[in-house]
């Protein structure tokens, strides 16, 4: 009975060990991770390296790495799918969507790639008959998104910072005071005290 309890304890990670595993995956520094997990700074180096040798921690690290790798692969596949979809939207040709008479093809006549570029299929009743209509996703938006994803242009973001403005005012005030001291005629440079800086 005692052996079973001891064996179960050895298989489960204690909370500090779980935290050690989570922290270790961030930057792979066993000593720092031991400290962040709550171990003493004096013994962190030893405990960090001991933890890395424990089979249950090695197993937990391996499982965590595998999980991360799976998520990375999934994210890469999703990113690749987005890239392919944007490429389809950018490169589709309207001629592929109409027959020889210029009428839109039926949906079942389109390939899956072609169908993904169609935003809307509809019909239009006119005096001369019913006509099929086809509306596509915006090609220019797809180009814009693709260029942003490739880093071909970046948006300029204006950040207003009152602290920066305050520092600029301080610098201007200092310059004005220095200009007053260096004035050979002895005239003081006028400063505006409305900003509350003296």
Image (cartoon, grey):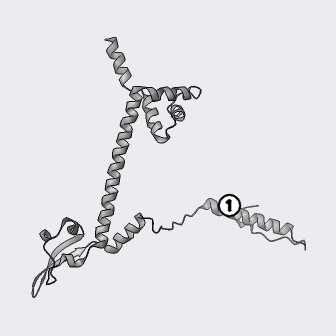
**Quick one: 100 or 195, which is closer to the camera?**
100
Which residue occupies the extreme right position in the image?
185
Q: Residue at x 43, y 29 (%)?
A: 15
Q: Horizontal placement of 8 versus 25: left or right?
A: left
For label 1, the SS is helix
Q: Quadrant of the N terminus?
A: top left
Compared with 69, 84 (above or below) is below
Question: Is 196 or 94 nearer to us in this picture?
Answer: 94
Q: Position of residue 46 (x, y in %)?
A: 54, 26
Q: Which one is in front, 5 or 166? A: 5
Q: Is residue 182 magenta?
A: no
How many neighbours does mark 1 have within 10 angstroms: few (below 14), some (14-19), or many (20 or more)?
Answer: few
The residue stretch that appears in magenta: 100-105
Residue 162 image-quadrant placement? bottom right
User: Residue 60: x and y, percent?
Assistant: 38, 32
- Marks counted in the figure total 1
Q: Which residue is mark 1?
A: 167
Image location of residue 139, percent across then percent down: 32, 73
- On screen, residue 139 above or below 79: below
Give the residue drawn at x 30%, y 72%: 91
Q: Quadrant of the C terminus?
A: bottom right
Q: Is residue 13 visible?
A: no
Instruction: Judge whether residue 25 can be spotted in this image.
Output: yes
- Position of 98 relative to 85 (above/below): below
Q: Residue at x 78, y 68 (%)?
A: 176
Direction top: furthest residue: 1
């Amino acid at each position: 009975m005692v052996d079973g309890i001891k064996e179960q304890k050895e298989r489960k990670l204690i909370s500090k060990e779980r935290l050690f595993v989570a922290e270790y995956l961030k930057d792979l520094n066993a000593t720092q991770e031991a400290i962040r997990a709550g171990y003493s700074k004096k013994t962190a180096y030893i405990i960090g390296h001991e933890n890395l040798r424990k089979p249950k921690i090695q197993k937990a690290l391996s499982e965590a790495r595998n999980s991360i790798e799976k998520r990375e692969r999934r994210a890469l596949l999703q990113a690749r799918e987005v890239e392919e979809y944007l490429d389809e939207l950018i490169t589709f040709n309207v001629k592929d969507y109409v027959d020889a008479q210029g009428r839109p093809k039926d949906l079942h006549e389109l390939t899956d790639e072609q169908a993904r570029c169609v935003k809307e299929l509809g019909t239009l009743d006119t005096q001369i008959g019913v006509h099929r209509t086809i509306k596509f996703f915006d090609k220019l938006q797809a180009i814009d998104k693709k260029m942003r994803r490739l880093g071909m242009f970046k948006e300029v973001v204006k950040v207003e910072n009152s602290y920066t403005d305050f520092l600029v005012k301080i610098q201007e005030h200092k310059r004005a005071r220095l200009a007053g001291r260096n004035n050979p005629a002895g005239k003081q440079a006028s400063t505006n005290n409305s900003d509350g800086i003296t």
